Amino acid sequence: LKHRLSKRQFLALVLLMVGTILTQLSEMSRSDISGGNAVYGGLLVLAGAALTALPNVYYEKVLKTEGHNLWSKNIQLSFWIWFWLVVIKLPSLLRPEGIQWPSGATMMTGITAWVWSVIVLQGCRCLLVPATLKYGDNILYSYTKPSSVLLTALVSAIVSGILPGASFVLGATFVLL
């Protein structure tokens, strides 16, 4: 978007990356205990970050460019999301017994008040992301995800009483700087 980073902004991004790496390293020691694969998980996080960065930059460009009809772009984006959801779900619907449509009772099984609160929060996120990209920029948006992880870790530590390790705290400090 023809925006050059100052040295301070570049340093902030480097600190964000170092903090994220340190928090991931703290999870590697835990994954050995629980049988998970933190290296694989870390690689998936990097791939996810790369795959979400490109659309975010494009979406920021669309939001900040005059003359674009945002309604048509949102409908176009929604269509492609819907299309790929159908493509992914179609094989599970086509079974040898025939098409099995889920019933209303089975679709709502397990939906509790906590799940509804998460749904409402995700709905608020759908409003906040475009506002952040329109009035801020992608760099500001890149700080929201690590900040939400830190907030979640803080709430989890308070609720469960399990304190994070030193590597996680050091990584969190780098993210907050």
Image (cartoon, rainbow, N blue to C red):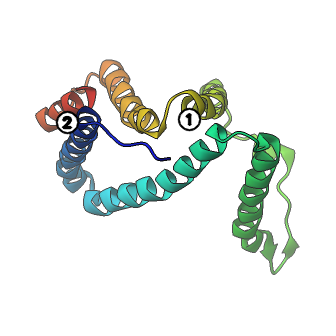
SS label for mark 2: helix
Residue 86 location in percent, x, y?
77, 64
Amino acid on which the number 1 mark rests in the picture:
Leu
Residue drawn at the location 77% of the way across and 57% of the way down: 82
Residue in the foreground of this view, choosing between 20 and 101: 20
SS label for mark 1: helix
Residue drawn at the location 41% of the way across and 38% of the way down: 139
Give the labeled residue for mark 1: 133
Q: Is residue 171 above or below residue 2?
A: above
Specify the quadrant of the image occupied by residue 144: top left
Residue 158 location in percent, x, y?
32, 18
Residue 29 location in percent, x, y?
17, 49
Q: Is residue 99 above or below residue 126?
A: below
Residue drawn at the location 23% of the way across and 31% of the way down: 172
Pointer 2 local density, CA inside 10 Å: few below 14, some 14–19, many at least 20 = many
Q: Earlier in the sequence, mark 1 or mark 2?
A: 1
On residue 171, the disc is 2
Q: Residue furthest top?
A: 158
Amino acid on which the number 2 mark rests in the picture:
Gly
